[in-house]
Each structure stands twice: as structure tokens, then as C-alpha cells.
Amino acid sequence: MSMHEVTYSKKNNDIECVHYVESRKSYLPHTHPNHLTIGYIEEGHVCITIDGESCIYEKGDEFRIMPNVLHEIKPVDDTSYSMMVLCIKTEAVVNDDDLKELQHAIMEKPDNIYLIEDMAEDVKISPYHMIRKFKKAFGLTPHQFQIQCKVRKAQKLLETGKSISEVALEAGFCDQSHLDRCFQKIVGMTPVQYQASVIKSD
């Protein structure tokens, strides 16, 4: 058993396992665009809000979160929990082709400078309506989603052993402190802590 509170291990390119041991970590509202998330509570209890509905999950409970669904995780009364989570790559269903292309463009190049006005022009609607439609479809505003995608890119780069300063630059952050702030907000730990928590599988 790892001594880390949270460990990440990839079974292959399509499945990632995240193991929480006596954790008190909270995660602000976020999404997983192309992953089905399946979790099992091993010890304690945790409050998970999925698409606006909060539920307390206890030892032996399972939960499932579909792609593009906004969710939040937090401990109950500051008590610890242990759980196993599988993130399984899958293709999300999006009815609006223009929005799907926009989401894909942000995911592919999150480090690119992509202004709201340019996004709106690409989907041929006003910025105001584009932001509303995007948030309704994907749970986050385009800006929030872009920051989340930058952090996901940073995670992948950190897994290769690159330095924090290199990762900040390649993932499109202003500087290392900007990466640190966004990373902690979404992942719940610093880039250094995340890099130490990744289990290399041969």
C-alpha cells in the first residue's frame, strides 16, 4: 500500500485508477469530458454532488458519473474517506455538432489563445448565447473548461517527469504560480505532490 493519500495509476491509455486512502480532499465542481467515472467507497463516507443533486455515499456504496456531468466531492464533517475510482475513456454524446467541435478544439489545444469572441464566431452565435449553450451542454463555461483542460494537459506532462516550469509553459499557463493555483483548485494537490503520487506501470 502506498503511503500517499492519493495515488494515480494507468492500467492502459483508456483506464486510470485513482485510490484515496484516509483522504479529506475536496474537489470543486468539475467535469470529465471523455470519461465515465465509477467509484467504490472502501471506508468512511463522502458527499458527492452530481448534476446539482447531493448524496452521502458510505462504505460499500458505488457511484457513477457520466461524461460532461458537473460534479463535486467533499468529506462529511471533516472526516476521512477511502475510495477507489476508475476513469474509463468513452465517447460522450453531444447533440450540437458546432458545440462538440468547439469542445474538441479546446481539448486538443488548451494552451492556445482562444478568445470568447473567436469561439462565438466559430459556432456562429453571439458570445452571450455561446457561453450559455456551452455551459448547459458541458457543465462549465468555455473559460472554466479551458482552464480545466490546461490542468489535464499539465497532469499528462507531469507524468512524463518534466519539470514544473516546463509544464507550466507547455500547458499554456502565465507562469508556475498560475499553474500551482489552478492545479490545486482542480486536482486538490500541488503539481509536485501530483508528480510524486503517480505510480509508474511497466
Image (cartoon, rainbow, N blue to C red):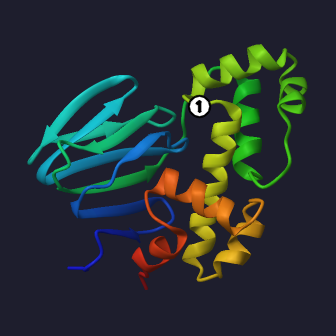
Where is residue 45? Give x, y as percent.
14, 45
Tell me what residue is drawn at x 34 percent, y 55 percent: 86
Q: Position of residue 126 (x, y in %)?
A: 84, 15
Determine which residue is flagged by label 1: 140
- Check the image and report above or below for 28 versus 82: above
The answer to whether one can see residue 198 in this image is no
Answer left or right for 16 relative to 132. left
Q: Dot 1: what SS?
A: loop
Q: Residues within 10 Å of mark 1 (few under 14, many from 20)?
A: many
Q: Residue at x 59, y 57 (%)?
A: 181
| Residue 178 visible to an observer of this rendering | yes
**Residue 180, percent across and down?**
59, 63
For residue 73, above or below residue 134: below
Left or right of 182 in this view: 80: left
Place residue 55 in its image quadrant: top left
**In terms of depth relative to the viewer, which is nearer, 97 or 164?**
164
Residue appearing at x 77%, y 68% in the figure: 169
Query: Total label count?
Result: 1
In the rendered image, the quadrant that contains the C terminus is bottom left
Residue 159 sits in quarter: bottom right
Amino acid on which the number 1 mark rests in the picture: Leu
Above-or-below relation of 17 to 68: below
* Quarter of the rendering occupied by the N terminus: bottom left
For the point 64% across and 38% down, the residue is: 144
Q: Nearer the viewer, residue 134 or 15?
A: 134
Q: Position of residue 44 (x, y in %)?
A: 11, 51
Q: Is residue 179 above or below residue 135?
A: below
Left/right of residue 191 with respect to residue 101 in the rendered view: left
